Image (cartoon, rainbow, N blue to C red):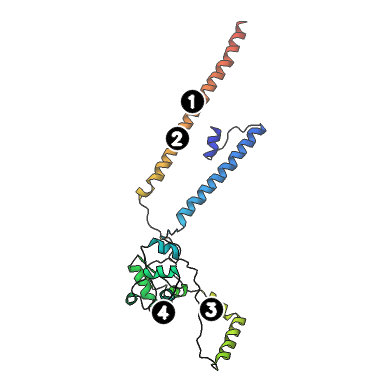
Amino acid sequence: MEIWGIFCQQGIADFSDKSSLRIAYFSVFILVTVLWSAYSAALINCLTSVFHILPFDSLETFVADGTYRLAVLRDTSNYDQFANSEDPLAKKLMNLMLEEDKLPLTVLEAFTNICENRNLAIFAFDEMKMSVVHKIPCNVIHVETGHINNMAIILSKRNPFTDVINFQLQKFCENGIMNRFVNSPFKKKSNDLVKQQPVPLISIISLLIFIQIGIVLSTCILIIEKCIFARKRKKMSMIHHIPSIKSSEF
């Protein structure tokens, strides 16, 4: 009963003087503290964290799923990247690609199509999403593909401005301006905030039942302990009463 009381966050009325029992009680206290801390942390994590369960997490699993269609911006290098590639994965992605005349022309149109068609995915870069993040009418989740977006300035051969542009780009790199452009944050709308909604009584009925069961069990345990203590006390009084009767007869 004392061990069960420790698990129920109850104190011990009579703490033993024996070292072995003290060590056992202390170990149980530590165990209960760890268990309740882990339970509280897990409960808070479930209530406050947002978990996204995705049907795929890479291009390979996207192809294996086969229930989604793929879209890229029309007349861009992203489309040529899949259309002219000999990679087996790129060919499988082309089989899931929308028809060329149905591909979106703008970034906003692409993300709007995603919101309208839940079985559509767009191959785009983070910069594209961040440029229209305030105008996207729904919440979207990105999946890392491992592709790196390279940008370049195309000039004619032996162009007289090549050295000037290279000099200015080198100065940007040395002064940290290029890193500033890369790391410059976009103002984005936080879509992962948990919106507080009123909780109906039916949603917490299981918690109330659990609390009531705990109260009933605690009351039953209290009654049983009282009965056991009263019986022990009665036996002890009878044992002390019998020797007093025998001594009075003598």
Q: Is residue 38 above or below residue 192?
A: above
Q: Is residue 174 visible?
A: yes
Q: Is residue 32 above or below residue 20?
A: below
State the mark number for residue 76: 4
Instruction: Tell me whether the residue at label 2 lies in contact with that at label 1, contact meaning CB atoms closer than 8 angstroms.
Output: no
Q: Is residue 10 left or right of residue 69?
A: right
Separation (CA) of disc 1 from disc 4: 84 Å
* Residue 159 point in image, percent of width and height: 53, 93
> Mark 2 belongs to which amino acid?
Leu
Give the class, few, some or many, for how many residues have Cα within 10 Å of label 1's Cα (few <14, many ≥20).
Answer: few
Q: Residue at x 59, y 40 (%)?
A: 29
Give the class, few, some or many, for how many residues have Cα within 10 Å of label 2's Cα (few <14, many ≥20).
Answer: few
Q: Which residue is situated farthest in the top direction here?
A: 250
Q: Which residue is mark 3?
A: 181
Q: Residue at x 56, y 19 (%)?
A: 236
Q: Is residue 133 left or right of residue 40?
A: left
Q: Which residue is situated farthest in the bottom direction here?
A: 160
Instruction: Tell me whether the residue at label 3 lies in contact with that at label 2, contact meaning CB atoms closer than 8 angstroms.
Output: no
Of the image marks 3 and 2, the number of the one nearer the N terminus: 3
Q: Which residue is mark 2?
A: 217
Q: Which residue is mark 1?
A: 227
Of the image marks 1 and 4, the number of the one nearer the N terminus: 4
